[in-house]
Image (tube, rainbow, N blue to C red):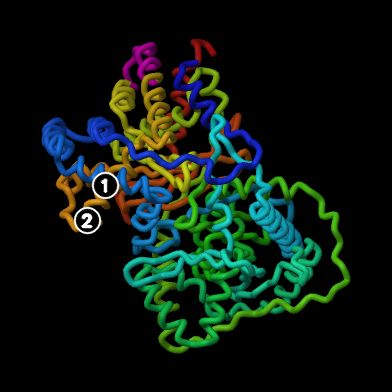
Amino acid sequence: MTNVNKKLSSVYSAVLGPARPHSSAPPQPVPPLTQTLGRYLRALEPLLPQDELDHTRKMVQKFGQGGGLGEKLQQELEKRARHSHNWITDWWVRWAYLESRLPLAVHSNPAISLPRRDYSDWRGQLVFASKLIAGVLDFKYRVERGRLPVENIRGQLLCAELFPRLFSSCRIPGPKHDYVAHYGRSRRGPTHITVVRNYQFFQLDVYNSDGTPLTESQIHGQLLRIRSQSWKTDKEPMGILTSEHRHTWGQAYNRLLRDKINKESVRLIEKGLFTLCLDSPVMRISDDKYSSRMAAQILHGGGTYSNSGNRWFDKTLQFVVGEDGSWGLLYEQATAEGPPIATLLHHLLEFCKKPDRVRAPLVPLPMPKKLYFYIDPEIKWDIEMAKQNLDILINDLDINCFNFQRFGKEFPKQHNFSPNSFIQVALQLAYYRVHGELCASCETASLRMFRGGRTDYIRSPTNQSLKFVLAFDNPAKEAKVELLREAVEVHSELTEQALQGQGIDRHLLGLKLQAIEEGLSVPRIFMDTAYGLATHWKLRTGQVPSNTDSVMCFGPLVPDGYAVCYNPQPDHVHFSVTAFNCCEETNAEKLALTLETSLCHLQTLLQPPGA
């Protein structure tokens, strides 16, 4: 095994250690300017023709010269790093999430579809939902008491400060940018969740008067009461409003809150610890399409005639439980990206294996409170427009989920490859086979090794991956194997750099935003067509860090792009591929089939003759 792969294997095997204070995570470093600019130029090489590359190189050299603008901005970033909790996180959250005006549904909120449970009616749905609620409350208790096993990478503590913010938090729409409200910070924080069924929202208190959480049987009794109060299916789907373009929803939000009853109901949804969505049955389909349909259900609810009204897309945590055994989680990323969510889900899956030993005490509980809305003609119009727009968006999204069963992560390991880097090179090959070129591709890397760290990007297209895909139809097998090894190892090195806080994309963004903060013109390297191309992410990818058969799904970042999520298990890999139907150049099914073929070809390449 190479040194890089030895490092990577330890990077991905987070071990649990004793709890230590969050502050022992070190501050996130500001990478050296010359290093970032050099790596930026290398990242452009497989994407640009030589003449454009020469033009950009001169521009970058001028920006980075001694005493130049880049050096001055770098000094200010280093000063910012010395005097802030994290020099980039606040900027990143504002720029990537809160200032985006695109709808949260499809474009931003990721969905995780989890293995189907063993029930097929509303009775099983409510029993499992009760267990799920109890499991999330148990996780919250451990967070508050500092009893979560602390994750480490190579003995380095991972920052855990995001966990408390998952609860009682909600994104609030604004005219120019949103903000996130955290209601759980006060000593007496909210003690309720919101439950939505048939588009009707309920406030469900999940703690007894002495502060102890309700037992599973108590919760089950309350869910039965909610079910008995939500038979009607003719209610207006208020949650649909949260799927709108952020500016449109911001205006509707202000109109909605003019009424006192509406304001009280909205605030209770926003303040709730989390939201439970009890979905109605969906039309049965063939087994091969089931995973794609379930991913879509979690992601957007299936449309206005299905369960999309059972969502409040601004809410940080929404657990979805269907009547057919399907379930999953939809989350809003301004508060936290994938890794803390994965920790929560791991706890939840382990909790769900335990029997419910505690019976409910014979104490009468208050009836769950139904939340009411006053809908005037303006709000009615807002809802109708939101329904139309969401259905258009849902019909535009093509989702293709499949389970690749020829091999899993053990096969690359047998050949001394990092499984993640191996899959990333396969993705490059598949994209090249469909489109005849490489494109700007990003994979998310967690920066939780650092205090307040969020994410950076790993740029998968490299000179080595380009050489490999160009040579793949060459009959010389030994040369192809060597080129594959080089491409995988370079991706592994880029992964290591990003995890160590030495990626290029957050640093470049910081330099750009520092200039704007100082009232300067945006530096020319960020106005260059090369930077526009390099940040037009046609291939958005992500690995689900999960030891269960879950499928993660989200929409592409750009109209002419794809999003690919994958979950490598020992002997198989779950994939989800999405694209927009409105773009004639992209096709999710075609990329999925080509990816499957490419993985098979890589397996054949590495196997000895006659195997």
Q: Nearer the viewer, residue 226 or 17?
A: 17
- Mark 2 / mark 1, whichever is N-terminal: 1
Give the dominant element type of the magenta stretch: helix, strand or loop: helix
Q: Residue at x 16, y 40 (%)?
A: 63
- Please state if 333 lies on the left or on the right of 132 as rendered: left
**Residue 156 is inside the magenta segment:** no
Provide the residue designation for mark 2.
Answer: 518
Q: Compute the Cα span from label 2 to label 1.
A: 10 Å
Q: Nearer the viewer, residue 320 or 349?
A: 349
Q: Which mark is residue 76?
A: 1
Disc 1 on helix, strand or loop? helix
- Image quadrant holding the C terminus, namely top right
Magenta region: 472-484
* Residue contact at pointers 2 and 1, CB within 8 angstroms: yes
- Please state if 254 lies on the left or on the right of 201 as rendered: left
Crowding around mark 1 (Cα neighbors within 10 Å: few <14, some 14 to 19, many 20+) is some
Disc 2 on helix, strand or loop? loop
Crowding around mark 2 (Cα neighbors within 10 Å: few <14, some 14 to 19, many 20+) is few
Give how far across and how far down residue 333 sits, in percent: 47, 55
**Residue 473 is inside the magenta segment:** yes
Q: Amino acid at mark 1?
A: Glu
Give how far across and how far down residue 47 sits, in percent: 24, 35
Give how far across and how far down residue 480 sits, in percent: 36, 17
